[in-house]
Amino acid sequence: MSSTDHNQEKNKEHYEKLYANYNISNILHWINNLEKFLNSATTTETSWFGLYQNNFREKIKGKKVLEMGCGDCTNAAVMAALGAEVYANDIASESGEIVRKLNENYTFKQPIVFVEGDFLENNLTSKSFDFVVGKAFLHHLTIPVEKLFLKETARLLKSNGEARFFEPAVNSKVLDEIRWHIPIGGRPSKFNKDAFKIWKENDPHPDRSFSSQHWEKAGTAFFGEVEIIPVGTLERFSRFFGWGERRNRYKRWALKSERFLPGFLNKPFTRSQLIVYKNPRV
Ligand SMILES: C[S@@+](CC[C@H](N)C(=O)[O-])C[C@H]1O[C@@H](n2cnc3c(N)ncnc32)[C@H](O)[C@@H]1O
């Protein structure tokens, strides 16, 4: 088995388990209180703030949108509840089960369509989507597989369409090394060699570049226009604020303010990024 296949197998195994028997009640609560949910998520959560920047919420209404790596399908459900015609894919077929339950329990203007199986084998029509999006998705692919997904994105987008990918950013090697040595959540410190090795074997992220420069270069192969928007340079310090409203207040301030930082600070120190590709070249 090649390392690329191994990475896809690892992702499938990991996420099938994570989404098995998924309880959709939270998602239903959020889409039944859509404005309230989005007002909060897009001002305090980096991935929602990032993906929904520049009026995405309004832009997708009535538009045909494809989400790659839809995961637990929260974003697919939100976009469909906003009035978009949503197609969603994930390597985990359990995501399809979540889509089925969502369609059964909520009357979307148009039910979400789950594109089952290997996305690179899809039969979707060329130039048929207004938006292609991914949230924390591309960095789960090896670089050769990512190239195929970006090529497919360019094929599927209308000529005036737009792709948006919200991804982590690692633009400073020094910061990255420090990060690996600080234990966080279930991830042990690199200092703890044995535990780190075991963690790494089960981690669904391939070893690859997460740099803005990489995604800039990868995009120019298939798109005439590439924009990288840093997200999280100041927000990353929210972890020092504990939990609750104090933390959220800081996050709201940080996400609003950090866009005014000069590029020489914002780019190397950003935690995440929104990658925008337009003008597909096919
Ligand atoms: C970090 S999760 C993000 C899920 C969701 N977008 C979110 O924001 O919560 C990454 C997702 O990418 C999916 N994935 C990984 N490799 C994939 C592939 N080759 N094709 C489709 N989906 C893939 C995983 O199954 C997982 O659901």
Image (cartoon, rainbow, N blue to C red):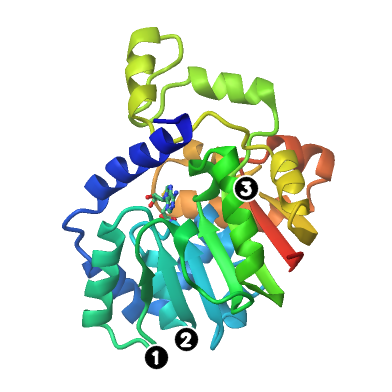
Q: Quadrant of the N terminus?
A: top left
- The circle on residue 109 is 1
Q: What residue did someone put label 3 on?
A: 147
Q: Secondary structure at mark 1?
A: loop
Comes first in the chain, label 1 or label 3 = 1
Q: Is residue 112 above or below residue 142?
A: below
Instruction: Pinpoint residue 192: horizontal percent, then vertical percent.
Output: 39, 10
Disc 1 residue crowd, few under 14, some 14–19, many 20+, Cα 10 Å: few
Callouts 1 and 3 close, C-beta under 8 Å: no
Q: How many marks?
A: 3
**Kind of residue at badge 3:** Lys
Instruction: Pinpoint residue 195: horizontal percent, then vertical percent.
Output: 33, 14
Name the residue at 42% across, 79% down.
80
**Kind of residue at badge 1:** Lys
Instruction: Pinpoint residue 71: horizontal percent, then vertical percent.
Output: 37, 56
**Kind of residue at badge 2:** Gly
Q: What residue did someone put label 2 on?
A: 83
Q: Is residue 92 above or below residue 25?
A: above
